[in-house]
Amino acid sequence: MPEFAIKMQMRTASTVLDSMKITGALISRLILRGVDADEVRRACEDGSLIASSPFPMGPKDEILLPISNLLMYIRADVSEEEFRDLMRNRKGLPRYLPLERIREIMKNDVEINLGDLEEIRQASKNNESESKAKGMVVEPFVYYGNKIYANETKVFARHFAFYARDGKFWVHIRTKWEDETEIALQDLEKEGLSGRRSAGYGRFTFEKFEDHLQTGVSGNAYYMSLSLFVPAEGELRMIDFERSYYRTRIISGLNGDGSSFGFVRPITEGSLLFLKGPVNGKTIPIGGGRVKRLLPFNLMALEVRR
């Protein structure tokens, strides 16, 4: 199955993207470009059409991956004192590391000491955005903050996150329609990918590059998820949850007729999953009225330790 990667550079600010939003946008564009809708649906279901969530690129265009769950993996091997120190100083840690560094840490039975952490902290300073956008930098090019709202009866805050203009990310894509998918990305360059596209948000430029990544799951190894993931029926037994380190999030929304489709609770990207066999995940169809949509929660993952 053809796989390729793209470098994305944001031309405007953007709400935060994930694998579901990018894959969903590709689904729409491919159908508008004339690819049969049933074929697209089947490709989503069997995992032959999927995009990863976007991850930042380092100063030398190296691919970076999140380490939030790796810290909990490290927890199993360091002393209580070392782990307390790590947690006290976690604001100085990067949120991302190069893939080879992650594999090295795991291959060495997670032998990591405070000297290693200090080296990582120093290296991370090169990955911070120099944008003047307000907010606290917690990831390269990603800002968080709170917007305060008030009326006559109450005051409340809304949490928000966004990509800064000029942020640079990489996305890995698996598709059976490589040429058509590249054309779809060219369409999305102009239209935008995030929310508030009509206001100019989410514009980007992209170029293909070779990331030399082999995605896919054979089993009996640790994998890092690159996408939001909901196990299909029968796949839960393939996940060793006792040995996995992961987080979940809740996604809710509306059907085409305005009714709620409830909520979905996928495992987030960057999770470390010990998989005992092949796992694909699933695509969830939602509908109502004349509008039908697919929510793609198939697994794209990299082996990081066998």
Image (cartoon, helix red, strand yellow):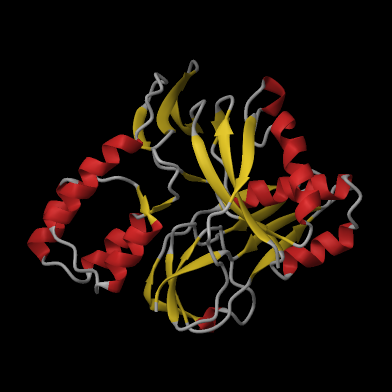
Q: Is residue 154 visible?
A: no
Residue furthest top as drawn: 152
Residue 82 or residue 247, whichever sits in front: 82
Q: Quadrant of the C terminus?
A: bottom left
**237 over 180 or under it: above or below:** below
- 260 displayed left or right of 126: right
In the image, is 54 to the left or to the right of 262?
Answer: left
- Picture quadrant of residue 39: bottom right
Residue appearing at x 37%, y 53% in the figure: 98
The residue under the point 68% across, 32% down is 192
State which quadrant residue 74 falls in. Answer: bottom left
* x then y, percent, for residue 135: 37, 25
Q: Position of residue 242 (x, y in %)?
A: 36, 78
The vertical placement of 125 against 70, above or below, is above
| Above or below for 232 versus 139 | below
Q: Is residue 3 left or right of residue 126?
A: right
Foreground: 268 or 169? Answer: 169
Residue 189 lies in quadrant: top right
